Image: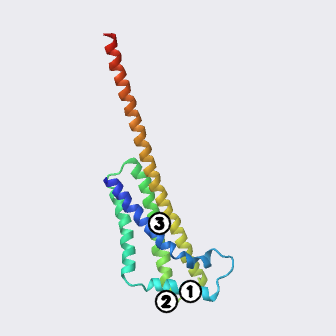
Amino acid sequence: MSKVSFATFLIICPTCFLLGAIFTNWTFDHATLWTSLPPTAPTLVAIESHYTQLHHAPPIIPRVLHITIGTGILGFLVKLYKPSESNLLFDGASLVLYMVALVMYGTNVVKGMCIIADGDYGEEVGRVDTLRVVAASQVIIALVLVGVLVLQSGQWYAEKKEEQEVRGLKLKEEREREERRGGGKKKN
């Protein structure tokens, strides 16, 4: 396995893991984002209970999550160490998206979970709005992470296509050389 493919592995696996972690929250977020009816009091209590439980999870849970995030960043650093043109375009854009997801996680999701766990909702942003901000942030993070996966697959496709074209050009050049050599021998 080459350095580039291993680094791609270090990007794709954490991204998929993070998408899975976000997906587990969507059963709770559905009531705040995707229904036209306002959430009921028992639904709000269930959502708050879920996020409070996540916030008060044993320290190993956030550590594993943060190690996974760090592994993705390590993959980007490896791929951007001596970048090719495709690395600058695809991996640069992927890194920007990954960092957008990381910033949204730190500013909206973590902060929102702290507010939910404390139960200290402000006057400007109430209980339901806080839950909606956390839910919407997770949807945006999921879309951004899917964008990372799309860019990484696009890079793989572009590199494979370039390899095929280079191989085709080399074969064409070899045939032309063979024809020139063969044509010169026939004349003598």
**Label 2 amino acid?**
Asp
Which one is in front in this view, the residue at disc 3 or the one at disc 1?
1
The N terminus appears in which quarter of the rendering?
Answer: bottom left
Q: Earlier in the sequence, mark 3 or mark 1?
A: 1
Q: Earlier in the sequence, mark 3 or mark 2?
A: 3
Q: Which residue is mark 1?
A: 46
Q: Earlier in the sequence, mark 1 or mark 2?
A: 1
**Label 3 amino acid?**
Val
The label number, if any, that marks residue 100 in the structure image: 3
Residue found 63% across the figure and 74% down from its top: 34
Q: Secondary structure at mark 1?
A: helix
C-alpha gap between disc 1 and disc 2: 15 Å
- Is 168 above or below relative to 43? above
The label number, if any, that marks residue 118 in the structure image: 2
Crowding around mark 3 (Cα neighbors within 10 Å: few <14, some 14 to 19, many 20+) is: some
Q: Secondary structure at mark 3?
A: helix
C-alpha gap between disc 3 and disc 1: 29 Å
Q: Is residue 123 visible?
A: no
Q: Position of residue 95 (x, y in %)?
A: 42, 60
Which one is in front in this view, the residue at disc 1 or the one at disc 2?
1
Q: Horizontally, is 159 left or right of 142 in the view? A: left
Q: Is residue 106 visible?
A: yes
